[in-house]
Image (tube, helix red, strand yellow):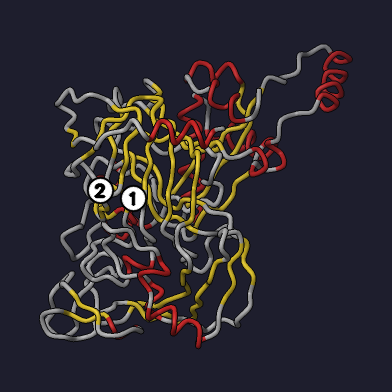
Amino acid sequence: MKRAISMCLLSFVGVALCFSPSLAAEAKKIVFASEIVDVIGPSNKMIGPVESGGIIVATPEAACYGPMITPEVRSGHTQTIPVAVEGAVVGDAIAIKIKKVKVLAKATASGTETAIKGRFLGDPFVAKQCPKCGKVNPPTKLEGVGADAIRCKHCGTPCNPFKVTNGYTLLFDEDRSIGVTVPKSVTEEIAKQAYDYAAVPSKGLCYPVTLLSLADMPAGIIARVRPMIGNLGTIPAIDMPSSHNSGDFGCFLVGAPHDMAITKEALSKRTDGHMDIDNVREGAIVIAPVKVAGGGIVTGDVHAMQGDGEISGHTTDVSAEVTLEVEVIKGLNLDGPILLPNKEDLPFLANLYTEDQVNKAEAIGEKLGFAIQKDLLPIQMTGSGANLNEAVACGVNRMAELLDITPEAVKNWVTMTGGVEIGRLPGFVTVTMMVPTAKLEQLGIAHLVKEQYGL
């Protein structure tokens, strides 16, 4: 039934309009985002606006290894073009409900890597450089398959800035529920049809990683597909590579020798959309800060699966169709995103209290003459920084500011009623705790939390 309603809505949608926050464009119920960008910020063109309560259907390309091996791209990620949300002004927040994540790719590849000396200027994700002619972010061409297939158009020199130290190619079953690593003989055939297997969208900017024919891992390893979105949120208040819109990767821009360099103070203008948290998946809600008029909803870096920490540095990037529902939350002045994960993804200590647990607690209170704080609901605050310690401190301080309590109190609440979980190394975490419902009502997000947890 939901699918039928969705298809009915789609049939009424026209072409999305270019948006300028200064123009009173008519808001749309549904906006399609198919164009791809690498750098995000105030200089972006936005499409839309989509109305609060409306739908965004985005079709990002596989957006991690592809951008890394495409020298023209000035980021370690690409994302879909920003979509403005009607009524969103600086100081508001936008709740992004992930309604669907559909994997389109038939295969992907990934692995660990090292940057190749002489093929980048300061940052191999941002300023790729031809080792012969020296051009930064040179236009390139393909000659065959494999690591040396990507060549500078000016001088013909291989200029992929990364060497894969241990890689694999994953082939999906027909319904994209399971992936299996394949042997070299199969990766070679996939590489010859790399664009088809990767389902590169028509407006994609990047070479598919499947053309590298990676096969260092044993064949036949089974991986469960559980799609998640590595990069989702709003655009920052300063132009930056979409992959560096976080406190850990953003550090590499501070004082960098290339033209995307920023100051340490400017890093606070980020929105932390590059989270790589595996709980950011179908059914979850991300509440993102608005730091540019209209917000600018972007999405990309969809993964077929990811273990906590993304310890290899990368995972199974795939092209996808992502359906999002958005809602403006007025006056919720956030520094970084709040996450409301699916109930089953909450830390054990942050699960809703059972009737038996409440009864036992109330018995203690009645015996000793004090009331029990039982009207509590869980939220996750994100935190990022140059390392995990800084990321945790960031998340704790953001939670303290949101709830108007001390960081020390947050630490105690988190220890008793939540936990800290690693999204990505080197420095992105979630800080989870139970929060009084009355405070969530005051912040204007209690309805979202109640809806998320079936209350």
Q: Nearer the viewer, residue 318 or 117?
A: 318
Q: Is residue 353 left or right of residue 318?
A: right
Residue visible at 26% across and 45% down in the picture: 265
Residue 414, percent from left and from top: 63, 38
Q: Nearer the viewer, residue 3 or 451?
A: 3
SS class, disc 1 = loop
Q: Nearer the viewer, residue 379 or 173?
A: 173
Residue visible at 31% across and 81% down in the picture: 116
Q: Give the labeled residue for mark 2.
A: 40
Residue 397 shows in this picture:
no
Residue 294, percent from left and from top: 27, 31
- Dot label at residue 203: none
Residue 200 shows in this picture:
yes
- Dot label at residue 245: 1
Name the residue type under label 2: Ile
Name the residue type under label 1: Asn
Give the mark count: 2
Residue 103, percent from left and from top: 48, 56
Q: Nearer the viewer, residue 19 or 285?
A: 19
Q: Is residue 455 left or right of residue 326?
A: right
Mark 2 vs mark 1: give the one in front: 2
Q: Quadrant of residue 172 in the image? A: bottom right
Residue 85, percent from left and from top: 31, 30
- Whether the residues at callouts 2 and 1 have beta carbons within 8 Å, the answer is yes
Point out the tag, 2 or 1, that comes first from the N-terminus: 2
**Image quadrant in which the N terminus is located:** top right
Q: CA distance from mark 2 to mark 1?
A: 9 Å
Residue visible at 26% across and 80% down in the picture: 150
Q: Quadrant of residue 320 in the image? A: bottom left
Q: Is residue 255 above or below residue 192?
A: above
Q: Callout 2: 10 Å neighbours few (<14), some, many (20+)?
A: many
